[in-house]
Amino acid sequence: LEESKHTQLSRCLTTTDLIALGVGSTLGAGVYVLTGSVARDKAGPSIVLSFLIAAVASVMAGLCYAEFGSRVPKAGSAYVYSYITLGELWAFVIGWNLILEYVIGKYLYLGTSSVARAWSENVDALIGGKFRDFSLTYLKMETPGFAEYPDFFAFAIILVLTGVLCFGVKESAMFSKIFTGVNILIILFVIVAGSLTADINNWYITAQDIQNHNKVCESSKNLGTGGFFPYGVSGMMSGAATCFFGFVGFDIIATTGEEVKNPQRSIPISIVFSLLIVFVAYFGISIVLTLMVPYYMMDTGAPLPMAFAGVGWSWAVYPLAVGATCALSSRTCQDFPACQQQDIKCISLKFLLLLKNFKLKINQNLFLSSLMGGLFPMPRIVYAMAQDGLIFRFLAKINKRFKTPLIATLLSGLLAGIMVLLFDLEDLVDMMSIGTLLAYTLVAMCVLILRYQPEKEDSKSGPRISMADFNELDSSETLLSRLINPKLNFPTLKSGKLVYSCVMVIAFVLCAALVNFSHTSYSLAMVLCLISSALIILLTIVILRQPQSTKKLTFTVPFVPILPILSSVCNIYLMCELSSGTWIPFSVWMVIGLLIYGGYGFRNSTE
């Protein structure tokens, strides 16, 4: 791993730069929209606990990334980590999925439209929809799976930001810091201003209140039973599964290993602080929003503007409107159902016009930081894979002037531009999630495996034990002794292989149990759960008994092997919750990647 100290890239990023990149990539559109939809339809006020659980699951994955960042400070994130631990095939699978995540996932606006397309709609709304009308008249595409019309403005946005990235990583980081800073200030304003109108009674809504609301609405929709857990604990857990994806994006930090001044220190610190900032933002807004407005009256598209208007604070819309130009729909009072028309009557005419003309739901600074968060890491993944020969090597060329992977950056931007120009990305958000969760799972397992592997012998200090004594001790151990009470206090090849085998069995048991859990009867599911839990606990005890590496790192994951195993459980569970239809396009993407690996990467790799 000594070669990780040498790089052709420019080492210019600081801890502050990384925190800004991490927050900008993670704190996307969800902070303005996710809270309203999850609170109204899944969790109610208990969404605050949903975000807490989601944050804990994300922190477990983040800590695993942090240890690897201090251990292997190279560009490539989970791809490099998997390469070192599991070999090039698994590394290619992860790298190929990370490309999918960054080219698709980071341009999605909560599964409804791409961030770049949102910017385009943004500007189009300000000019009265003329661009859309022209495109639908002369450029309409009526092909299933494609967008209604080619969005050339969104394509241009991608190309401009790609150009910014080409000029240098320091300039890109400064760009990201500015817009991320604006987003944080707006979020702080929402939390402080909203807390002044908080009403604790909104956490103690009764079933009678909900019945009265349904009578006014002439609706029979299930709005829960009121209280803090209107949809029960299961609703809170379901909300946590949705909220988890609000924390996806911090792994961008791990792709910058070769461009950070002090990666062993900066990467772990920035990952932890980024997740902490994102959690405080989500947690604070969810508390304020559920105290301002009854959960069943929240607007799922624009919860924050509607909440402030509902309490008579229409002036608070203006800070929210800083840079705001995009929305999912342009709705006046007449566009709402009868029950919401009555609630909206208290909103001033000025606010309604502002909501209609500027389509208030999110601010453009958020889009810019999210776009940068998506464009920044993808060339680094491509660069790392090309450098190892798994994909075409010319993509690993570094521009001598800008010290950036210029060809990889241009190709990544062009690919992303084509995606937003032609395709309807609405159905691809879950496919992106599979790749992300798979990467999180493998990183957790890699941390667990590496912690129990023997280190290379230090020629200066010499071996800690003579080879003759070592061979005698290692060979004299029986299998039962090695499982329960190993004689050596440092890892060996055999103990390392034992841990590797245990981790692989745990992963298989988790996948088999969780895949079949929801498709069996309750009694059979309980038996399956008990058997799989007992086996995992037994294997965890075996791993606990094995000696760990004593190598000193700037950051190590605490509570090994418990924490990495819990992180893997969370990630595999969320993967299994995705629909079967999601796995079909994902499989097609993987087949394309494996054909590239078989035709080129296998023969040209450096391994």
Image (tube, grey):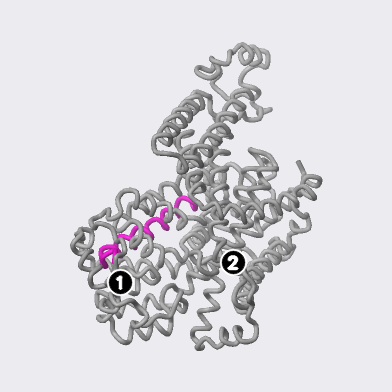
Label 1 – label 2 distance at C-alpha: 35 Å
Q: Earlier in the sequence, mark 1 or mark 2?
A: 2
**Rendered location of residue 416, percent (x, y):** 64, 67
Q: Quickly name the residue at label 1.
A: 307
Residue 549 seen in this snapshot: no
Find numbered disc 1 in the image and state the secondary structure of the residue it sits on: helix
In the image, residue 216 above or below residue 80 = below
Give 146 or 491, whichever is nearer the viewer.
146
Which quadrant would residue 193 be assigned to in this image? bottom left
Q: Is residue 468 left or right of residue 115?
A: right
**Rendered location of residue 124, percent (x, y):** 53, 83
Give 381 or 296, whichever is nearer the viewer.
296
Find numbered disc 2 in the image and state the secondary structure of the residue it sits on: helix
* Crowdedness near tag 1: few (<14), some (14–19) or many (≥20) residues, C-alpha within 10 Å: many
Give 102 or 393, whichever is nearer the viewer.
102
Magenta residues span 270-296
Q: How many marks?
A: 2
Inspect the image, locate mark 1, and give the three-letter code of the amino acid beneath it: Ala
Inspect the image, locate mark 2, and give the three-letter code of the amino acid beneath it: Ser
Q: Nearer the viewer, mark 1 or mark 2?
A: 1
**Rendered location of residue 386, percent (x, y):** 73, 53
* Crowdedness near tag 2: few (<14), some (14–19) or many (≥20) residues, C-alpha within 10 Å: many
Magenta-drawn stretch, dominant element (helix, strand or loop): helix
Q: Quickly name the residue at label 2.
A: 172
Give 455 or 95, whichever is nearer the viewer.
95
Residue plotted at (44% across, 63% down): 30
